[in-house]
Amino acid sequence: MEYFLKLFLSGTAKGSIYALMALGYTMVYGIIQLINFAHGEIYMIGGFTALILGGFFFSKGMPVGLVLFFSVLLSIMYAAAFGFTVEKIAYRPLRGKPRLSALISAIGVSIVLQNFVLLSQTEKFLPFPSYLPEFSWLQPYKAYINSTQLIILAVTTVIMVLLTLLIKFTRTGKAMRATAQDMHMAQLVGVDVNRVISVTFIMGSALAAIGGVLICSYMGQINYYIGFVAGIKAFVAAVLGGIGSIPGAVLGSFILGWTESFGTGYISSDYEDAFAFVILIVILLIKPDGILGRTQKQKV
Amino acid sequence: MKRRNTVLMVFAMVSLLVLSGAQSAFGAPVIKIGVAGAHSGDLASYGLPTVNAAKLVVKDINAKGGINGQLVELVIEDDQCKPELATNAAAKLVSSRVVAVIGHICSGATKAALGIYKDSELVTISPSATNPPLTQSGEYPNFFRTIAPDDAQAKLAADFLTKTLKLKRIAVLHDKGDYGKGFAELVKQYAEENGVTVALFEGVNPGAPDYSAVVNKIGNAKVDGVVWGGYHPEASKLVQQMKDKGMNIPFISDDGVKDNTFIEVAGKYAEGVYATGPTDTSSNPLAIKAIEDHKKEFGSEPGAFYLNAYAATQALLNAIAKAKSTDYDKIVAALQSEYVDTALGRISFDKRGDIIGFGFSVFQVQNGKYVELK
């Protein structure tokens, strides 16, 4: 039972890591039906920015709390600017063209950004210092969950709730939903579609940066390639939960995390990926749009 | 029509031959040597030091007038440690007419490239590919290496954990790659022969952000030691997550982890980790010179496999000099018969291509440094 609980918590922690990234995939897909493959790279860039700024602030003798606050804030802004620019340069000109073109453009952006960081920073793995607080009251339970995992879980939950509220109750959220339903119609009734899409990318990239800082703190290392592996799994999680749906992305991530964790714990970690993809196939066979995905009616 | 095409083809080929002949007549004759390995990507820190080593040895030789009156020139190709890129790199080296190759770096990539070199009769000396079958299968008579194979390393690790650490029950993990899994399987085999129980033997996904599930599994298996076959990025995540969960059991790994990047990344979590790696040769004057030259030329400490690559290049150039030709059979014969003083000491190669005169030791991270245990 104790072992089960440990695996459950480890799966939960893993799920919240995937969820942090899956939210970004799902938001962009929900609005413009584009799988933004560059999302993983924005996450990596967010992490790198925080690492560089954190080191700089720390050397200036700032206290840890402020270092964390400013480096996270600035890396969010930097990553958001990246997301905004990428959309303008690589996706906007292809809007209305076949979806495959934008997809290929996304893969291209992903490769370009990876190599940009490889060349401008380093090919090496760098240590990522944890600026996150250690909770002393968690010490007795450290075999189950550690402070960083708990913070990631909490942040994921808060972000999911905020995003849901934002989409449900604000003007921007309404415009987003309208754009997602029918871009042309939304434009006709006066929604500034370009702005809505830009905002979506800015938000998605900001989330990626938060994810980058938290997940790198958890792993204790960073490298230009980390976005790729994490991105693939988060993408699977988003599809599993129903791509385009915010609660779906989180639910899908947890299901993926638990599947991998229990699969590893009770069977073998050799087949971790196999478990992930088997569960994906099973769910897509039963519900082709994912667990919480809305059924898309073909417009004839 | 057909005939005319043939005539054209012949003409084209003849003019090509004339052109290439002309080129070598005008330029000074050079001996081209390929250097292949990971020069970008995740594992570039394993491959780049080899390029530097080869450059420095060649610079020295050329300053002395080259070998057999010919200057030596390097042709450098990147394979990112990926087998599919390694075959491309190999094909490029063959077509640029190198006479031998220093490389590749990772075992998987080396294996992929070796078939091509074998068909083209090119001597290949790897500074770092430790997968045993590369020499032991007898499939690649053109292959040599200036590093002991994994089984030597695994045997040492298994003996160390049973005789020195006196472990009874261990977990063995690996990254599912040729190198890591090969090492892990051999440690398992030798440890079981020594009477140790291997309670857990599993592969994990390289690059995954989280290993807490498998770390829980290690805890549940009640082992008193963990062996990791693989590279340093995963090793540092594993030791970190193990220590975070309060598991303070010995962690024993291979020379993929005996890299200073591991200590930099894992920081305080690296303390106490054991890793097998090539015996320390830093008291050898040639090694000291090699390291000094590196600092002078590149302004930094050399990285992984630097001395192995330095020795590989020295041994190769020596063999070409002794053979007085770039003929494949003569180079092979010279490599196997001549002893040569290199940065690794006085070495030669056996009939299978494994190095004679250089081996492995166990190291431990103590106060942020790898210290050789005697």
Image: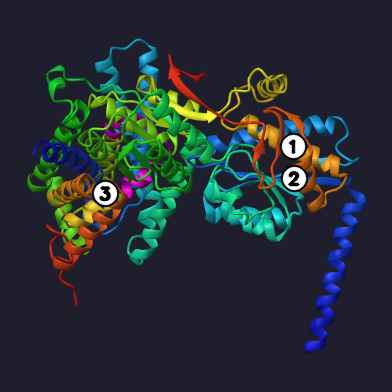
Q: In what element is the residue under mark 2?
A: strand
Q: Chain of mark 3?
A: A
Q: Does the magenta segment cover residue A224?
A: yes
Relative vertical location of residue B180 with respect to residue B258 in this rendering, above or below? below
Separation of residues labelled 2 and 1 (CA atoms): 13 Å
> B305 or A109, which lies in front?
B305
- Look at discs 2 and 1 and give the one toward the viewer: 1
Query: Can you give x and y, in whole percent of width and height, for residue A6 in the image?
Result: 15, 36
Q: Residue furthest bottom?
A: B1
Query: Can you give x and y, in whole percent of width and height, for residue A191 in the image?
Result: 19, 54
Callout 2: 10 Å neighbours few (<14), some, many (20+)? many
Q: Disc 1 marks which residue?
A: B315
Start-end of magenta stretch: A213-232
Q: Disc 2 marks which residue?
A: B33
Separation of residues labelled 3 and 1 (CA atoms): 45 Å
Relative vertical location of residue A279 with respect to residue B233 in this rendering, above or below? below
Q: In what element is the residue under mark 3?
A: loop
Residue at image position (19%, 43%) is A15
Please state which amino acid type lies under the numbered disc 2: Ile
Quadrant of the snapshot with the C terminus of chain A: bottom left
Do badges 2 and 1 share one subunit? yes
Please state which amino acid type lies under the numbered disc 3: Ser
